Image (cartoon, grey):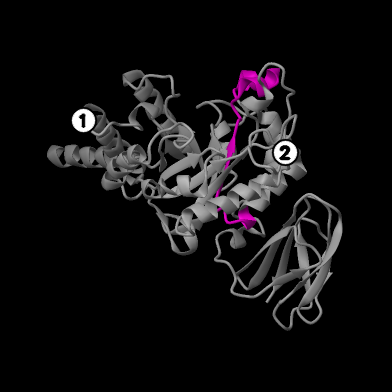
Amino acid sequence: MMRRRIFKIFFVCGFGILLALAPAFAAQAAKVTIGPHNVIFVDGKAVFPIGFTKAPPPGSKTPSGGDAYQELKTNGTVFHLVGPLPKQKWGPDTEAELDHIMELSAKAGLLTAISIPQLQAIGPHDQQKTDELKRVVEKYSKSPALGFWKAEDEPAWGKVSAETVQRYYDVVHGLDPNHPVWVTQAPRGTVASLREYNPGYDIGAIDIYPIGYPPGEHSLGANKDISMVGDYARELQEITEGKKPFWMVLQICWSGVTKPGRTLRFPTFPQERYMAYQSIIDGARGLVFFGGTVPGCMNERDRELGWNWTFYDRILKPVLDELKPDSPVFPALVAPDSSLHIELQGASDIEYLAREAGGYLYVLAAKRQGSTVQVEFSGLPAGIGEGEVLYEAPRKVAVTGGKFRDWFAPHDVHVYRFKE
């Protein structure tokens, strides 16, 4: 009788321990893949990633006292850049910091992009660094917080060879095919020179920060308007030849507006919204926002919190609210381009994109700088009589014979949705 009672107590206690540990056993590494039309999938679900380089410090709070990571997660499939800074030495201390960030990210449901600068540029005969990179990949590839691996930052501009980037990719991808390798290039170089790096990454990107005084200094191109974002997105389409997804890295704040003698300048809501939608129209399958942790861009309150919550609350959050998974435009963000032949007449400086999803036809359109114009879209399916202008309710457009007209001012964005 006593043995049965002891066994019963042991069984119940043991079962309770297993239940308590179940979440740890259940947590599995996310599988991130690239599907047709360069759409990114996480565990089989199409997503439009939103990235932050970097996010608020681990364990930090929002101005209202909420968990910072939980707030970022409200924006959908969110990832953030993690790992030591370029001048920090990779070792036990920085690895422990990374472990802590990975743990908190997994708890909040955030993905990460791991960047360890000292392990990115490895020489052809540097076996010690190669072995350490292999160890790191094998370790973190099992983390439920891992989303992507970040290769050398701006390698072409930094004169890091394509062969060096390729060595990093071969090690990482060979050990962990479930998490893509991401490379960001500077807005420098030519299509031909940047194309040399294509074999060494899965997801490309260019960072471009046009807001400042004088405007457009981050680019060497002739176009100094914020529409330069679209110029570089189109360049990425050429570089990747349509075979790889790409992201655009957009501006919260950057060193070009914080250096001595410079005037601090942030994008306005219309500017940030325009740059985001122009990137999408020109092919971006995700967006990354840089500069939330730049000290010179933060007011006193935000410096204490470690992140630019003022910009996030006033400017960025309203933009991201339009793009998150429960937004009306989101199905278009993960859909293929429509086969419909939509045409536009009346202006040559309006970029637009048509996609079909969930029984709707979406047309996303953004105008570059210039004059205010009225244009006509044509080629819509027969039977459509009107369409919504999303985020401009209750405004609608009337459709007659597959055509509709609308006005565009400089940097206007209109998002149309038609029931098919």
79 vs 227, left or right, is left
Question: In the rendered structure, does residue 63 fall within the stretch colored magenta?
Answer: no
User: Residue 344: x, y in percent?
Assistant: 75, 69
- Could you tell me if the residues under marks 1 and 2 are in contact, i.e. CB atoms within 8 Å? no
- Which contiguous range is marked in magenta? 280-306
Disc 1 is placed on an element classified as: helix
Q: Position of residue 413 (x, y in %)?
A: 75, 54
The answer to whether residue 46 of the structure is visible from this angle is: yes
- Give neighbour class at mark 1: few <14, some 14-19, many 20+ (Cα, 10 Å): few
The label on residue 315 is 2
Residue at x 71% of width, y 76% of height: 380
Amino acid type, mark 2: Ile
Is 188 displayed left or right of 261 in the figure?
A: left
Q: Quadrant of the C terminus?
A: bottom right
Mark identifier at residue 6: none
Residue type indicated by callout 1: Gln
Q: Residue at x 50, y 27 (%)?
A: 58
Q: Residue at x 21, y 31 (%)?
A: 125
- Decide: is 255 above or below 162: above
**Image x and y of residue 12, in percent:** 27, 41
Residue 127: image tag:
1
Circle 2 SS class:
helix
